Image (tube, coloured by chain):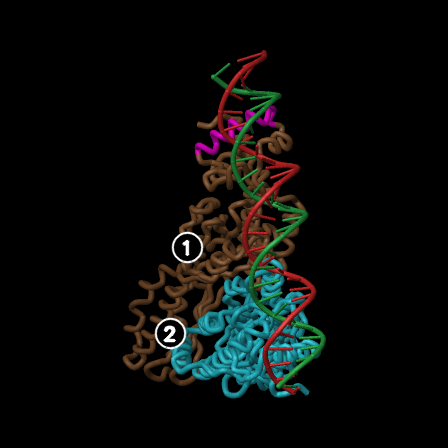
Chain colours: A brown, B cyan, C red, D green
Amino acid sequence: MLSERRLEVLRAIVQDYVGTEEPVGSKALTERHRLGVSPATVRNDMAVLEEEGYIAQPHTSAGRIPTDKGYRLFVDKLAGVKPLSTPERRAIQNFLDGAVDLDDVVGRTVRLLAQLTRQVAVVQYPSLTRSTVRHVELLSLAPARLMLVLITDTGRVEQRLVDCPSPFGEASLADLRARLNSRVVGRRFTDVPPLVQDLPESFEADDRGTVSTVLSTLLETLVEEAEERLMIGGTANLTRFGHDFPLTIRPVLEALEEQVVLLKLLGEANESGMAVRIGHENAYEGLNSTSVVSVGYGSGGETVAKLGVVGPTRMDYPGTMGAVRAVARYVGQILAES
Amino acid sequence: MLSERRLEVLRAIVQDYVGTEEPVGSKALTERHRLGVSPATVRNDMAVLEEEGYIAQPHTSAGRIPTDKGYRLFVDKLAGVKPLSTPERRAIQNFLDGAVDLDDVVGRTVRLLAQLTRQVAVVQYPSLTRSTVRHVELLSLAPARLMLVLITDTGRVEQRLVDCPSPFGEASLADLRARLNSRVVGRRFTDVPPLVQDLPESFEADDRGTVSTVLSTLLETLVEEAEERLMIGGTANLTRFGHDFPLTIRPVLEALEEQVVLLKLLGEANESGMAVRIGHENAYEGLNSTSVVSVGYGSGGETVAKLGVVGPTRMDYPGTMGAVRAVARYVGQILAES
DNA sequence: TCTGGCACTCGAACACGCAGAGTGCCAACG
DNA sequence: CGTTGGCACTCTGCGTGTTCGAGTGCCAGA
């Protein structure tokens, strides 16, 4: 176990490096932090920290920079979550309150998060899997063509065209609509399949084919939506990375276009709290030099989706975590209200 | 007017520069193109071209690179649109045919375009302004709360919550739904307002407030959708820009996040054909070192939206224009089928 | 009008030297 | 034993000077 002072030295290194983006040496450390010891002592401590793998030197005779392991220790033991200032909180709330629909909520959230953290923001649309059905609507577009519209309690709407095997009368349509709704409204998506399985049987032989088709389209929609949507913003912040440009930024941009990768990444967020994945802790190779801070959000204690930011491992963790948490909280509130 | 050979020299310069990304000199030109004259002659021609503003030297004693004006001439007079190969066409069609809904069509289109041109692709969702109404649905969520769902002929669905000033019975609801649909189905969005203006009058006094609210929400939806949605892809291709990185890429990323800017940009696409905006021809400053190739697409001769790519001014214009045009054509077909 | 030749210019690449920052180690001190 | 000051060493970064080569402009001649 590292002594108290050595931890303090590590904290100082992380803070300075995050601020200056330059390797930090022993002398500068003692000047900028009240460690109460001389540079020589700090040097000894640094040697130990390096041996343990918490810090490293880019080249001989340069200052030290934290390793992924060092950041990990910093996040776990040395840093709190920095709460936002009251004006910041107020600004968040005002900004989010202006949203008119779900797209707008997500859009505003992503811009807000990007601006607040000055990093790339990723927001997942509220998940359908956890949602409940608010309404199912069936519309007749042509004699043998229906449109199925599904409305969720998070305000999301999905529509599908259905080609019927045989013409379907208005009366049957109204009947199906009524029965379908009475069975599934208020139910969770995952609970729906068994509830509608026997529906075709109660219809006339002529209509059974169509009813089955409608049902399978409905179930398909639920499943397909497990592949969920994302919104991304703040990519211009990537240019702040600094030195070794194209090499760093390219794989990140590529990763951001791979929705699957991002969803997996967000998915790793711990159910309860916030997840911080640092550098190589990210399974996806392109993000090995970035950290991902993610958290779930939702209304009424239930997590309906995740959001987070992607930035350089050299980021202001307390501030970022504070911003991410605060935004998630307010989005949850907004969703609960609508 | 420039002589035939000088135009030929300009074409050669553009082609070589696009290929090599390096300033091209007189000697290299004569080696790589059968111009039939000596380097010295080419030098004289280059001096003229430079005087006229078609090419420039980065520094004295470097080769020449085309200016925006040079590219303009190249695009207008010297280059055709390079048609895609048959396998390419087939690949496009196969790829787009797999789409299941509108989101998917747009998503696939953007990926396709980015991959084909190796540049940033921008695709606008089919516009509502030009669309017609396929169906309006009203659902009762609570005694004084409705949901308005609007379905367009391009398969797009928009929903809005409506808080009623007074409770609204099922009978009135059905009545309103029927009358509304009989008036607006098949109509263009822009034609709708006058058609529904007198609707409230035909309802009971108690319900007029609600009917007005519903109508204004509907009209609002139409207007709001003038602010249309976009999908963007292929941003990782920006890293191919090369040398002077952060300076070039940053404003482009910023522009890409400003949907308003992009919409305006696409909007400039000529009704009939393709638009190519080169460098400083772009009104938006951040895109001064890029070119935008855009074109409208739609089903049945009608343009419902635009799509295009953003890339360095040093791009393969014939190839890019060919790809953009081909993709637009196939997307139009797909939309017409669904 | 085109061509070959020639002097000139300028940027890229490389070597050199210097200053500054930072380290590791050691001996001395409390 | 932990801490401290001192010292020699090792790098990187930067500015300078030099060379090399590509490319130009101009001119005289075909």
- Residue A44 is covered by the magenta coloring: yes
Q: Residue at x 55, y 34 (%)?
A: A11
> Marks 2 and 1: which is nearer the front?
1
**Which kind of residue does numbered mark 1 sit on?**
Lys
| Relative side of A58 to B39, left or right | left
Does the magenta run of residues contain B164?
A: no
Q: Residue at x 46, y 63 (%)?
A: A152
In-front residue for pair D23/A107: D23
Q: Nearer the viewer, residue B27 or B188?
A: B27
- Please name whichever residue, B280 or B73, is drawn nearer the observer in this view of the structure: B73
Count of numbered labels shown in the rendering: 2
| Residue A264 - label | 1
Q: CA distance from mark 2 to mark 1?
A: 38 Å
Q: Main secondary structure of the magenta part?
A: helix
Residue located beneath label 2 in the image: A176
Residue B206 visible in the displayed image: no
Task: Using the rendered view, name the quadrant where residue B84 is placed.
Answer: bottom left
Q: Amino acid at mark 2?
A: Leu
Query: Left or right of A103: which side holds A198?
Result: left
| Circles 2, 1 touching at the beta carbon (< 8 Å) | no
Residue at mark 1: chain: A
Residue A104 in view: yes
Q: Is residue B34 above or below residue A133?
A: below
Q: Which residues are magenta?
A: A35-52
Q: Chain of mark 2?
A: A
Q: Which mark is residue A105?
A: none
Mark 1 neighbour class, 10 Å CA radius: few under 14, some 14 to 19, many 20 or more: few
